[in-house]
Structure formats: C-alpha cells, structure tokens
Amino acid sequence: MARNPYEVLGVKRDASDDDIQKAFRALAKKSHPDLHPGDKKAEDRFKEINAAYDIVGDEKKRARFDRGEIDASGQEIRVNPFARGRGGGFRAGPGGGPGGGQEFAFEDLGDIFSQMFGQGRGRGGPGGGGPGTGGFAARGTDESFRLEVGFTEAVLGAKKRITLPSGKSLDVSIPAGIDDGQTIRLRGQGGAGAGGGPAGDVLIEVKIAPHPQFTRKGRDIYADLPVSLPEAVMGGKVEVPTVTGTVSLTIPKNSNSGAVLRLRGKGVAASGGKPAADHYVTLKIMLPRDPDPDLDTFVRDWSSKNRYNPRS
C-alpha cells in the first residue's frame, strides 16, 4: 500500500508548492538510479518519490487527495452508494422505520441505474440481448494505470510491458516526445462488457522520471555544459552528452558563461510528421578547483594592462 505522499517527501500537509517542489528535487537527485547502479532499494525509493510528487505536486490531484477522493497511489476512492451516512446511501431520521422520517439519497443509485440501462436494451430492443442478459447491454469498465518511463524513453520512444490485475500482459508503445501526465488509451483491453456490450479501455497515465542532467521544454532538450577557462578563451572541440550518445561540439573563441549553443536534431526524435528537435547547451565557465598561483599572477599582470568592466 502506498505511503502518504506528504510523509514520503518529508513535508507538512500545508506546505507550499515551492517547498514541495524543492523537497522532491532534493530527494530525486539523491536517490536517482544513475547514482546508485544496481541498488534496488534506491530504485524503489526513487519510484516512491516520483509517485508521491505525482500526487501532491499536481494542484488538482493534491486537492482531490486532501478531500479523500483519491488514495496515496492516485486511485479513485469509490463511495459505496448503500453506505449509511453522508455522501451516499440512506440516512435514517427519527423513528427509523416507515413514517419515521427516513431520508433516502437517490443520486448515487440513479447514477448506477442510468449507467446500467443507459446503454440501450440489447441488440433487439426491449426484451432483446439474449438469454441471461437481463434485457440490456452494458459497456465494460475502464481500468486506469500509472506507468513510469525514463527521460530518454520518453524522448526517443520505447516499448514497455505492463501486467493487468487479470494476469494478462500488454505491450505499450511509448511515442517519442510524449508529455508528462499524458494518457495512452488501449481500446477494448479493459473490463468485459455485460449482455454483449463492448469491453472497456485501459487508460495509462505516463509519468516521466527526471534526468540528472537534462531538462525538456516542449520537444527541445536543455543542459548545462561546464567548460574550462582555456576552452572559453581559445575555443576548441569538446565532448557533449546527449540522449542519443556523446557528440563533438565546437566552442567558439571568447565564449562567455551563459552562451547557448545548439545541436541540431539531438532533441526529441522525429515522429508524427514532426522533425527531430534540438539540444541546447548553456556554457558554464569553471575555474580550477584548487587555487593556482601561476593563474593568479597571470590574471593580475593581465588586469593591470587590460582594464574593462563587464557590468558596464
């Protein structure tokens, strides 16, 4: 059973959206599978963190969870229409028996019967539908699932296998460029219909795992690229990681931190008539980690002869 998402993220129920997002990012970065290869506990922890953020990181889902409409795994909490008390079923007033002021709430019962009989009376109209159908045909129920896919799988497309509660396995095609929260519908794979009615569908909500280096805006991918001081001043070729592998990128001479360079066609793969998107890298000049007396001397001598104000 899924844990309370607030407890998973270590935040209070009244935490702000920013606090929840900060907590998620810190935990996701700490437990990312890439940092713990082969560690099943870290992988399970990472999945739990993502599932919790999927609930409380979404304004609508968070509100529904707080109202008790969905559980910690995001599944609907079904209300028994025959349950006593507020919210469905019947409520007995003073006296309890006939004439004693009983109050019946028919709204939920009406929904049930309209769903059962609103599909028509079978193929042959009233009285049709064949033996044992009760004279009506009803569509099967839809079954909802949540599927986590990796960042790269969402960018390039992939095939994933899911197993239904019935034990049946299905191969799901993840289209390249799918968005976080998007739903894939598998028609006719849900609950069986009644009285000859059609089967329901399987609805799969896709949750995309974050990547430690890359982010996505639409179909383009963005990442920071650390470069050394000599590379920034004199330029040169450097190796850059992308979702399809490492590529060579030319750094122009006299490049500043914050400069953005584009790798064409290295973003979301071409699909649906759309061309491949791009990968953008933002240069970040990194000085040596340890102090270097020679560099200090050079900069001091250079600065005395070359005055400039980068903030002017």
Image: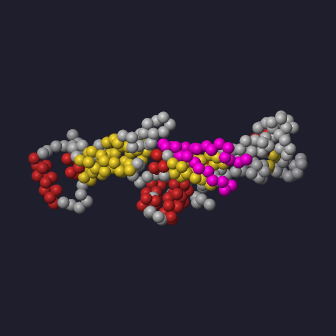
Instruction: From the top left corner, tell me how far across and down residue 70 is, in percent.
Output: 63, 51
Q: Is residue 179 on the magenta stretch?
A: yes
The quadrant where residue 187 appears: top right
Please tell me which residue is depicted at 77% across the width and 53% down the height of the picture: 84
Please tell me which residue is depicted at 59% across the width and 50% down the height of the picture: 171
Q: Where does the N terminus fall, quadrant-wise?
A: bottom right
- Identify the coloring: secondary structure
Which of the pair 66/118 is nearer the observer? 118
Q: Does residue 152 appear to the left or right of 202 in the view shown?
A: left
Main secondary-structure element of the magenta-colored stretch: loop
Please tell me which residue is depicted at 22% across the width and 46% down the height of the picture: 235
Q: Does residue 91 appear to the left or right of 43 in the view shown?
A: right
Q: Is residue 302 on the magenta stretch?
A: no
> Is residue 243 among what the camera can see?
yes
> Is residue 225 among what the camera can see?
no
The span picked out in magenta is: 166-192
Instruction: From the top left corner, tell me how far across and down residue 32 is, in percent.
Output: 45, 58
Q: Does residue 303 appear to the left or right of 235 in the view shown?
A: left
Location of residue 188 with respect to 11 vertically, above or below: above
Q: Where does the C terminus fall, quadrant-wise?
A: top left
Instruction: From the top left corner, tell me how far across and down residue 192 is, in percent.
Output: 73, 47
Which of the pair 231/272 is nearer the observer? 272
Please tell me which residue is depicted at 85% across the width and 38% down the height of the picture: 128
Instruction: From the top left corner, tell me how far across and down residue 262 is, in percent.
Output: 34, 41
Residue pushed farthest right? 98
The quadrant where residue 293 appears: bottom left
Q: Tally the numbered discs.
A: 0
